Image (spheres, rainbow, N blue to C red):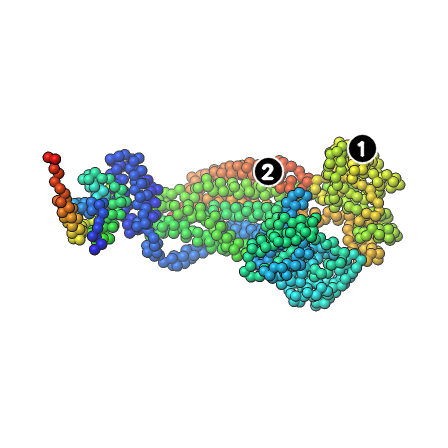
């Protein structure tokens, strides 16, 4: 499956889209990333990642309503697909599995 | 309500995004960047938000976001659209008769002028492109040191040339091409003409088509090939083949039979043969043979010329061994098609006539600028009548680009009509007329030039864009909301229109000054005192020194002949110069060699000293007479000595200045030297008063009775400057024509502008009239504007005219009046009269107008 491997930024964006739930579009993802992770990315990168994830079938999108601040332009809202959700689960479980195998730090020496 | 002062993202970046972004993605991307902009605006301030916005857009310029297939997004029915444009354009041209008339006549006159310039210049610049084998034909040239300087020579040793075919299998044909002057006798006509001696393959290599006879006719050395105009001149309707042509080599007269007739050589050929003979004919005949001849080779198909060139270097050693006094440095090949652009000594092809080319180009450019300015002005004003159409087009979805294209299309129709008319004008009037004044050097049929279509297409595109782009751009700018509200201040663009009109007036001032100055100078030249007796003197040539005495005896015996005197240089046509020394300093002066009695015989006026005395031996050997300018220039006086050919010569007399060469040339220092009878080339015969015309045929008859096998070359002294006068009048007429056309075009421009701007204000005038304004008050503003434009034009135009026309006159004439107040004021007055008549004719409309009618319209 194409979505088997996703990069780190892709993973974060995918997670954020999931978190934002019904309000996930380019700018909101960018802002959320800044607020929650403290990471600033150019909007072009967000768009590129969102496009790629959609191509991989992890996201779907729809044009939403217009907004005054955007000069009446519509937003493209993204939502997590079930495949996307499965990929996130898979990544998490793999991380957890590996993390749990870390030896406990021994402070007693 | 939104704050109007709220900052906006940088417009250029937004436009850039709109331009590149795929329309599918544009809305969301643009929305995102705008949202981010306003967010950053609050967080970080205007400057940094703008910078970040631009940066975002640059970062978004990615392959994925860029629009690629425009057809995906723009699927208009272009055919219907253009059909509509053409229809509307055509209707507009028909409906707006006056402006269309001004535009079309102006443009077609300008295009006619351009065509004349093109027809004159093209064949002189683009040469030798018409030979079928042209790609394979090369001139064999060499480099050599002559007098210590390395020069490139377009010639090649004739002996080596003969062997080229045997030594180099890559060479298909060779053909030497040697020009010489010979005396010809065809039927009873004896004349001197250029003849070219060529190898038999010449006609095979080069594409000079034969009218009669075959291309291999020159293999027979007893045949001659002549061109068609020669054939018609001497044989008329008779069948020319096998007619006899006699060529005189020294004492020997050889008869050739015409073996073929070729078409007249086109103007765009560097090789200009009118007679062709086999090269073998030269051998052992009196024609001076140099070792170096112009030599052409035709290579076999597919042979690399550079490779051959390097293998030709083997001949350098051969040449230098055989001819130690004509050493070659290297041998190189020059393609026939580029030959005329190379500066090669001895290669065929003349230099470019720069002065007439520059003049013609300037005239054509002036006319085009004037006509295009008219168009631009009128088009902008006409648009005021069409703003509603533009408004509607925009409202129902017409884009600005489409409106620009629409106006350009209309312009294209107009330019196309103008080009057709211009072609007609050129063919019917301008070209024949130009030929008359330039001596028939231009093809009368524009379509005989193979590049004419290219030129016309280029002209169409250039004129359409130049004349149409600004109006279309300006017109399409109007906003529908403003148009329908009726607020746009339309048709009042005086700044731009006024500048164009001023520019036109400047051009016409320059041309009028040129016209006036050339008329003045022409009459000045024609009325110059020649400084010698011109009437009742007929010159005949002395073909050989041995015949001098018998011609003198025969002529003096004729009744009606009063006196004869020999000369070597003709007054009015003496261009020879000689170097002389004054205290070791070398100088140059013109020289006239004549018999001792000649100066007095020709009625030259003595200023100081005495005439030559033919009885004095020393006068013929070591005396000279000089003109007054010579004395002034070198600060000498009578009885001083100058060195000629390292012999001291005494100045025995000083003559008043006289025009010993063309009247257009300035009089320079000239020396008259008495010579013995043996060097006389002409005999001047003074006939009794007023019998010039009657005596000329008698003299010719007597001359032909004495001399055989030499052409008669008689001249009448009083007509010696006729050719120069003709040229000068031709130039004058050209400039007068230009001035008239330019003024007319400028007047049309003023007419159009005045009439359109006034008709757009008719309602205003009507109201003012009703309220009691008189004509003066109504039209004062129009007059004032024109006075301002005219004054500016007069100042700028006069300054330019002094510079440009002064330089032009200096080029053409040795003597001319300075470009002073008289021509400048007369030009200004002429232009002012024309301009004000034009405006007043339009003001008349306002005067006659009944306010009731203009006000009732709505």
> What chain does mark 2 sit on?
B
Can you say whether B254 is above or below A12 in the image? below
**Pointer 1 or 2: first along the chain:** 1
How far across and down, in percent of the image, does residue A71 sit?
26, 44
> Label 2, on which residue?
B803
State yes or no: discs 1 and 2 in contact (Cβ < 8 Å).
Answer: no
Tell me the quarter of the image containing the N terminus of chain B. top left
Residue pictured at 61% horizontal, 54% vertical: B312
Q: Is residue A13 left or right of residue B360?
A: left
Q: State the SS at label 1.
A: loop
Residue appearing at x 52%, y 41% in the figure: B503
Q: Residues within 10 Å of mark 1 (few under 14, many from 20)?
A: few
Q: Is residue B362 visible?
A: yes
Q: What secondary structure is marked by label 2?
A: helix
Q: Quadrant of residue B238?
A: bottom right
Residue at 65% over, 40% down:
B810
């Amino acid at each position: 499956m194409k979505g088997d491997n996703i990069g780190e930024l892709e993973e974060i964006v995918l997670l954020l889209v999931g978190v934002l739930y019904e309000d996930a579009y380019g700018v909101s993802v960018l802002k959320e990333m800044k607020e929650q992770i403290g990471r600033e990315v150019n909007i072009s990168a967000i768009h590129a990642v969102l496009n790629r994830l959609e191509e991989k079938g992890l996201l779907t999108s729809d044009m939403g309503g217009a907004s005054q601040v955007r000069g009446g332009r519509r937003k493209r809202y993204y939502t997590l697909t079930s495949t996307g959700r499965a990929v996130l689960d898979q990544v998490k479980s793999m991380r957890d599995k590996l993390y749990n195998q870390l030896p406990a730090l021994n402070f007693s020496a | 309500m939104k704050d109007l002062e709220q900052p906006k993202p940088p417009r250029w970046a937004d436009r850039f995004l709109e331009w590149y972004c795929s329309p599918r993605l544009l809305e969301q991307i643009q929305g995102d960047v705008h949202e981010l902009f306003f967010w950053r605006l609050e967080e970080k301030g205007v400057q940094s938000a703008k910078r970040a916005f631009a940066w975002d857009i640059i970062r978004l310029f990615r392959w994925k976001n860029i629009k690629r297939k425009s057809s995906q997004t723009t699927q208009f029915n272009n055919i219907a659209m253009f059909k509509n444009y053409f229809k509307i354009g055509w209707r507009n041209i028909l409906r707006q008769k006056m402006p269309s008339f001004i535009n079309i006549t102006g443009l077609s006159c300008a295009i006619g002028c351009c065509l004349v310039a093109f027809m004159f210049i093209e064949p002189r610049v683009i040469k030798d492109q018409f030979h079928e084998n042209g790609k394979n034909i090369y001139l064999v040239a060499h480099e050599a040191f002559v007098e210590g300087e390395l020069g490139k020579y377009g010639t090649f040793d004739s002996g080596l040339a003969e062997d080229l075919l045997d030594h180099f299998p890559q060479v298909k044909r060779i053909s030497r091409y040697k020009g010489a002057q010979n005396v010809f006798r065809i039927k009873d006509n004896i004349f001197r003409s250029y003849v070219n001696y060529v190898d038999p393959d010449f006609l095979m290599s080069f594409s000079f088509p034969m009218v009669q006879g075959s291309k291999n006719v020159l293999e027979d050395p007893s045949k001659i090939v002549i061109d068609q105009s020669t054939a018609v001149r001497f044989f008329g309707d008779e069948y020319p083949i096998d007619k006899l042509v006699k060529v005189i080599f020294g004492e020997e007269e050889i008869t050739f039979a015409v073996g073929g007739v070729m078409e007249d050589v086109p103007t765009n050929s560097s090789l200009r043969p009118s007679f062709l003979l086999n090269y073998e004919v030269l051998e052992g005949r009196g024609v001076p043979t140099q070792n170096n001849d112009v030599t052409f080779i035709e290579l076999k198909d597919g042979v690399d010329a550079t490779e051959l060139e390097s293998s030709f270097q083997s001949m350098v050693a051969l040449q230098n061994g055989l001819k130690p006094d004509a050493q070659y440095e290297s041998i190189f090949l020059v393609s026939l098609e580029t030959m005329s652009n190379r500066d090669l000594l001895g290669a065929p092809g003349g230099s470019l006539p720069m002065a007439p080319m520059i003049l013609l180009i300037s005239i054509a450019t002036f006319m085009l600028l004037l006509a295009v300015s008219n168009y631009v002005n009128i088009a902008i004003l006409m648009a005021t009548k069409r703003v509603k159409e533009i408004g509607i087009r925009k409202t129902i979805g017409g884009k600005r680009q489409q409106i620009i294209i629409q106006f350009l299309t209309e312009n294209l129709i107009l330019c196309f009509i103008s080009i057709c008319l211009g072609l007609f004008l050129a063919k019917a009037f301008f070209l024949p007329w130009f030929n008359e004044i330039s001596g028939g050097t231009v093809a009368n049929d524009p379509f005989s030039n193979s590049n004419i279509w290219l030129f016309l297409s280029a002209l169409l595109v250039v004129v359409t864009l130049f004349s149409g782009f600004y109006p279309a751009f300006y017109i399409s700018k109007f906003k529908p909301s403003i148009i329908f509200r009726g607020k746009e201040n339309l048709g009042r663009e005086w700044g731009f229109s006024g500048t164009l009109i001023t520019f036109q007036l400047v051009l016409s001032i320059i041309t009028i000054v040129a016209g006036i100055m050339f008329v003045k100078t022409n009459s000045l030249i024609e009325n110059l005192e020649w400084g010698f007796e011109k009437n009742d003197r007929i010159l005949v040539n002395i073909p050989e020194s041995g015949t001098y005495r018998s011609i003198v005896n025969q002529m003096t015996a004729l009744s009606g002949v009063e006196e004869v005197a020999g000369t070597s240089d003709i007054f009015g046509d003496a261009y020879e110069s000689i170097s002389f020394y004054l205290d070791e300093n070398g100088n140059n002066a013109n020289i006239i060699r004549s018999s001792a009695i000649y100066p007095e015989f020709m009625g030259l006026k003595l200023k100081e000293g005495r005439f030559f005395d033919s009885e004095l031996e020393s006068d013929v050997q070591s005396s000279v007479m000089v003109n007054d300018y010579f004395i002034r220039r070198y600060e000498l006086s009578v009885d001083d000595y100058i060195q000629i050919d390292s012999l001291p010569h005494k100045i025995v007399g000083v003559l008043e200045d006289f025009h010993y060469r063309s009247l257009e040339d300035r009089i320079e220092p000239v020396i008259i030297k008495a010579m013995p009878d043996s060097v006389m080339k002409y005999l001047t015969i003074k006939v009794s008063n007023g019998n010039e015309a009657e005596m000329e045929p008698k003299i010719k008859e007597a001359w032909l009775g004495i001399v055989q096998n030499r052409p008669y070359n008689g001249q009448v002294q009083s007509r010696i400057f006729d050719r120069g006068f003709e040229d000068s009048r031709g130039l004058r007429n050209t400039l007068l024509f230009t001035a008239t056309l330019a003024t007319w075009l400028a007047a049309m421009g003023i007419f159009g502008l005045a009439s359109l701007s006034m008709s757009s204000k008719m309602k205003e005038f009507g109201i003012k009239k009703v309220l009691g304004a008189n004509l003066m008050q109504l039209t004062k503003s129009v007059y004032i504007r024109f006075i301002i434009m005219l004054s500016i034009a007069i100042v700028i135009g006069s300054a330019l005219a002094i510079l440009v026309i002064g330089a032009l006159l200096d080029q053409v004439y040795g003597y001319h009046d300075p470009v002073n107040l008289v021509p400048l004021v007369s030009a200004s007055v002429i232009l002012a009269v024309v301009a004000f008549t034009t405006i007043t004719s339009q003001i008349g409309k306002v005067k006659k107008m009944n306010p009731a009618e203009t006000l009732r319209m709505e």
